[in-house]
Amino acid sequence: MNRLKYFEYINLKIRETIQHRPVICIGQNIDSGSFIGGLTRGLEVGPGGQIINATCAENTLVGLGFGIALNGGHCVLFMKQLDFLLLGLDQVVNTWNAIQNRKPEHKIKGSFTIIPVVIDSGFQGPQSSLNSLDAICSIGRTEGWCLNGRLDIDFCVGEMLRPGFRILALSHKMSNTELINEAGTLERDHGYVRYGSCDSPDVVIASAGFTLGDALKLCKILSSHGLSSVVVHIPSATGSSKCHGCEPEGEVMKHLSCADRLVILDDSKAEISVGDKLLSGVFSEGAYAESRVWFLRHEARRFAPEITLEVADDQTGWDLEKVAREIADGY
Amino acid sequence: MALRIRIAQILISEELRKGGIRAPVHLALGHEWVAVDVVGAMGPGDKILLSHRNVAYHLVKRSLASVLHEYRSGRFGSMNMIDPDSGIVYTSSILANQFPVACGVALSDNAAGSGATTFVVAGDGAIEEGAFYESLMFAAKHELPIVFVVEDNGWSMSSPVCSRRLDVDIDELCFQIGGEVCVQDYRSRCPSRPVFVGDGLRFPHVWHMKVNTYGSKGHHYHHGPIDIDIDPEYPVLCGAERKLWSREDSRRILNELRGEIG
């Protein structure tokens, strides 16, 4: 299990979840070619299900998924790039609005899950590099999750046939890397995962988007500097979930009552991201007055001087050693 | 039935004038026969997905009182009004948005082997949207049991379609993509020949329904109170209707409907 790669493990979990179930899987090249980097290789569904190699018609594919769910069925739509979903935004926003506002007796019993790959490697140029799942989920008032490690993958993929609609996004950058399989605690009801020391940590690390790997790496580097840390990983693309009632702010604030240093990692390029919301929450609670805050982003922002901003290059990422030294030195 | 729907729409318009309805209402004067024929072609278990101009279909399926109640109090207003129990499973206020959703419903029924047919209705303006082609292509490839109903009144978005685009041969276009096309011309003959599903034709079907539309000052019947001079006691709009409908029937239905809604 430890040696499985990120896409391999997600493929395994998807296959486990849909086999023997009447699921309609659809997407471009999901049963041929590279199988989206192996993501869709070997899919099998139960009676009443289908695997469909679809046309290049994203608006229709998204609407199709809603139609299937509306009719009580289950649909999983795979997309090679999150960018493609922009062509289906009418359906994500308008159709989902119409469906989720139905009377209780007409609520849908089927499910629709979109599984897109976020092209976050940094080599694709200004197009084909949309990394704003949170913005898409916000405009569609949609549940969305960024799959990082084994615990959140198990949690999200395991529930993808639950009635309703959701987007489960994968990182292209992580596709061929080893699965993050660290021991942690999944707070199922609150939709976050906790890693590391909970007992009076020196540093609280909050990770959003596809930053769990960096957060755990920072945790280890800090340990080498003699600092203990807890990682609160927030896989929800909006920082909240109507179904699971995410409370990551509460968890972060709880640990900040002991720690005096907070690091937020967020690789989203949205104007308002989960990290921004978390920072805002910390501000509103007044905790930042007694804490030092490091915000690791991919886009520059103007913040109060108490907040140290580290902007990553798309291709190289953050200099975590430098950040750890600053934290250790009380910069 | 078509006369009843015509009169019911006039009473809805009266309610609009009185301020009893705040939701936008898109009347369909002249489209009544299409709704009667399409609903008449539906079998048990069949489903229908509609556009914002859905009033005639709702009035075939349900009472005027229940439609007015939804207009006045429903959270969906008029443009997203549904009635799943009667088969109206989805309506869209977004042009052509319902085509892909309908394909999903049809695909799901097909996969489950239910034998049901899905009907999806839109105006001729909606065929300008890419979703129409995408959906028809998908439906043709997978031979989905679906009927695309195009209500062609020559108007779209408050202007004649010829003022905005080239004249498209809808029938040839749909045939080339893979749809079995059936043309019904309601402009000179009411009712048209009844429409049947199946008859050995392969799916998907495209029913091209040519209708006259009625209004003055452009396309005002589209939205809000009608402003043409129409007699609620005998609301005929063309000679063909005058031959079919009597003043006596019209007055009787008007009184019945007024009694129904108080």
Image (spheres, helix red, strand yellow):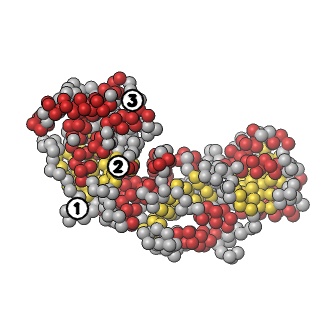
Mark 2 vs mark 3: which is more N-terminal? 3
Most foreground residue, B218 or B74:
B74
Return the residue found at the far left. B243
Q: Which residue is mark 2?
A: B86
Q: Residue at x 32, y 31 (%)?
A: B261
Q: Circle 3 — which element? A: loop
Q: Quadrant of residue A73?
A: bottom left
Element carrying mark 1? loop
Q: Quadrant of residue B102?
A: bottom left
What is the x, y in percent for residue A113? 52, 59
Residue at mark 3 to residue at mark 1: CA–CA distance: 40 Å
Give percent across and percent down for residue A283.
Answer: 76, 40
Identify the subunit bearing mark 2. B
**Position of B148 relative to B215 (above/below):** below
Give, as a three-letter code, the residue at label 1: Gly
Dot 1: within a 10 Å radius of its alpha carbon, few (fewer than 14), some, or many (20 or more) residues?
few
Nearer-N-terminus badge (1/2): 2
- Mark 1 or 2, closer to the camera: 2
Q: Chain of mark 1?
A: B
| Amino acid residing under circle 2 | Ser
Mark carried by residue A273: none
User: Pointer 1: what residue?
Assistant: B198
Q: Which of the two marks, 2 or 3, is nearer to us in this view?
A: 2
A314 or A63, which is in the foreground?
A: A63
Q: CA distance from mark 1 to mark 2?
A: 22 Å
- Which residue lies under the disc numbered 3? B21
Residue B136 versus residue A253: which sits nearer the camera? A253
For the point 27% across and 26% down, which residue is it? B227
Q: Are marks 1 and 2 in contact (CB under 8 Å)?
A: no
